[in-house]
């Protein structure tokens, strides 16, 4: 299972980092707080950790079907030798990778330690509905990856719990996917369940 999250740094205020103890204790585990205080750009790292936690939460929610707002229970640990992250959740570990860019940070998480998927990040204009825009970009990418698919054949719906589902020609496909948007950016990730793609 997979999840993602994106943070637009201009919207979030990446340069702002006010270490209020109550906020830090509510959101960040002590090990993560040590990372923040040791980092040269803690404002940016703050949002990277948040994106990693949120992407892991989406994986955990698909597994548990439980709602939980307890960010400190999703503990991020960098894996320097791999460039990836291990995220401890209330019921096990999730694995993630992230991209830190000038304008945004984006994280992709998976229940499997070795995962491969299709990802995308796009800038969204202020006049566009970001929710509709990210769905449009996902459908375009699915059609690129699978040329026999046409846009009109693809339909996105949500499960009763709000998990996005993909249908092609009326049939629910074995895609696992996740969508995110924030500020000026949207992000998507999808993969075939139990399959690996490059």
Image (spheres, rainbow, N blue to C red):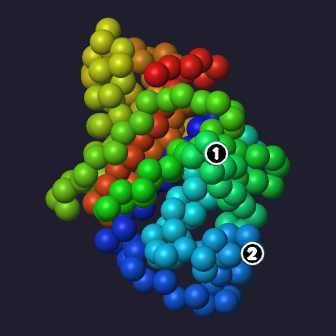
Is the residue marked by circle 1 packed among few (<14), some (14-19), or many (20+) residues within 10 Å? few
Q: Nearer the viewer, residue 125 or 78?
A: 78
Q: Nearer the viewer, residue 83 or 188?
A: 83
Q: CA distance from mark 1 to mark 2?
A: 22 Å
User: Going 39% across and 46% down the picture, which residue do you hit?
Assistant: 187
The spot of residue 87 in percent (x, y) is 70, 52
Query: What residue is shown with label 2?
Result: 30
User: Going 28% across and 29% down the picture, which residue do you hit?
Assistant: 140
Q: Is residue 153 visible?
A: no
Query: What residue is shown with label 1?
Result: 81
Classify residue 158 as left or right of residue 31.
left
Q: Quadrant of residue 25?
A: bottom right
Q: Nearer the viewer, residue 190 or 115?
A: 115
Q: Quadrant of residue 8?
A: bottom left
Classify residue 121 as left or right of residue 70.
left
Q: Residue furthest right?
A: 91
The spot of residue 159 in percent (x, y) is 57, 38
């Amino acid at each position: 299972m997979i999840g993602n999250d994106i943070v637009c740094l201009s919207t979030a205020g990446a340069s702002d980092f006010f270490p209020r103890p109550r906020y830090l204790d509510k959101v960040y585990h002590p090990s993560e707080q040590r990372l923040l205080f040791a980092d040269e750009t803690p404002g940016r790292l703050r949002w990277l950790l948040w994106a990693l936690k949120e992407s892991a939460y989406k994986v955990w929610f698909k597994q548990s079907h439980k709602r939980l707002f307890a960010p400190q229970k999703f503990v991020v640990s960098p894996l320097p030798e791999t460039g990836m992250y291990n995220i401890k959740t209330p019921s096990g570990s999730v694995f993630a990778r992230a991209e830190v860019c000038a304008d945004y940070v984006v994280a992709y998480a998976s229940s499997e330690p070795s995962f491969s998927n299709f990802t995308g990040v796009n800038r969204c204009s202020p006049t566009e509905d970001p929710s509709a825009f990210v769905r449009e970009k996902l459908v375009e990418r699915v059609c690129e990856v699978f040329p026999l698919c046409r846009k009109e054949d693809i339909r996105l719906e949500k499960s009763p719990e709000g998990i996005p589902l993909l249908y092609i020609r009326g049939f629910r496909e074995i895609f696992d996917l996740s969508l995110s948007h924030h500020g000026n950016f949207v992000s998507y990730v999808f993969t075939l369940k139990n399959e690996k793609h490059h």
